[in-house]
Image (cartoon, coloured by chain):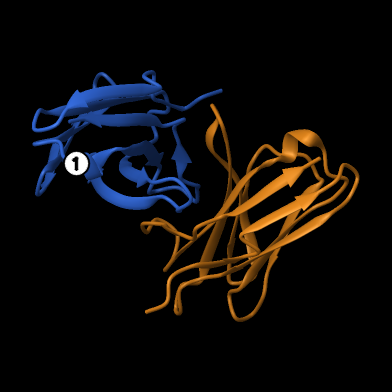
Chain colours: A orange, B blue
Amino acid sequence: KAGVTQTPRYLIKTRGQQVTLSCSPISGHRSVSWYQQTPGQGLQFLFEYFSETQRNKGNFPGRFSGRQFSNSRSEMNVSTLELGDSALYLCASSLGQGNVLTFGAGSRLTVL
Amino acid sequence: DQQVKQNSPSLSVQEGRISILNCDYTNSMFDYFLWYKKYPAEGPTFLISISSIKDKNEDGRFTVFLNKSAKHLSLHIVPSQPGDSAVYFCAAKAMNRDDKIIFGKGTRLHILP
């Protein structure tokens, strides 16, 4: 069974640009969550999608957005990038809410 | 505010000894707790969980203890092995609510030879 796949693994952007990150969940998993990991801040919740609906949202500005497709694949977008957006963005999938999350390896974003 | 707190950023333990990682939480609605382990350049992997109806859960070398009155949980690793060197995240969730899993900031565990 393939794991959670995130693309791209690494990317470099400059301030003001926008970025789209992709996540393919484990087959059969309908819930996808996104987290941001920065040094000293741990894993901060961005949002969760289930059956194409955003079910929960964290305390991030509106520049951070996401969506989920009918095949459960998810994307997150960050517009008008700032230096502080440099982080590891982790996607996790689960069968449904309340189940254990299975994480992908993450997309490391560097904003210059 | 930090609902899940891991107050020790790092911990060093001799190989073969016991590693104890601590976690405190503030939200009394949390009733399901998880520990994840993360190596560099990899995503976190699930280690062990515990429901609030129990005060202990064991899986091989890993045991999680829950003290609901103190809003405190701990992960014990016995005996500690070199491969246990990683960052450990404590996480919590309110299972009876439509809520997300909240993670702590993590504790970096170093197993010394």
Q: Is residue A30 above or below residue B22?
A: below
Place of residue A28 in the rendered image (x, y in percent of width and height, measured from the top left): 44, 78
Place of residue B2 in the rendered image (x, y in percent of width and height, measured from the top left): 51, 24
Place of residue A102 in the rendered image (x, y in percent of width and height, measured from the top left): 41, 60
Q: Is residue A76 left or right of residue B56?
A: right
Furthest residue to the front?
Answer: B113
Place of residue A21 in the rendered image (x, y in percent of width and height, measured from the top left): 69, 61
Identify which residue is drawn at 70% across, 65% down. A67
In the rendered image, the quadrant that contains the N terminus of chain A is bottom left
Q: Nearer the viewer, residue B18 or A49?
A: B18
Q: Is residue B92 left or right of residue A60?
A: left
Q: Secondary structure at mark 1?
A: loop
Mark 1, Cα crowd under 10 Å, few <14 / some 14-19 / many 20+, is: few
Q: Is residue A95 above or below residue A88?
A: below
Q: Nearer the viewer, residue A7 or A61?
A: A7
Q: Is residue B67 visible to the viewer in this orientation of the structure?
A: no
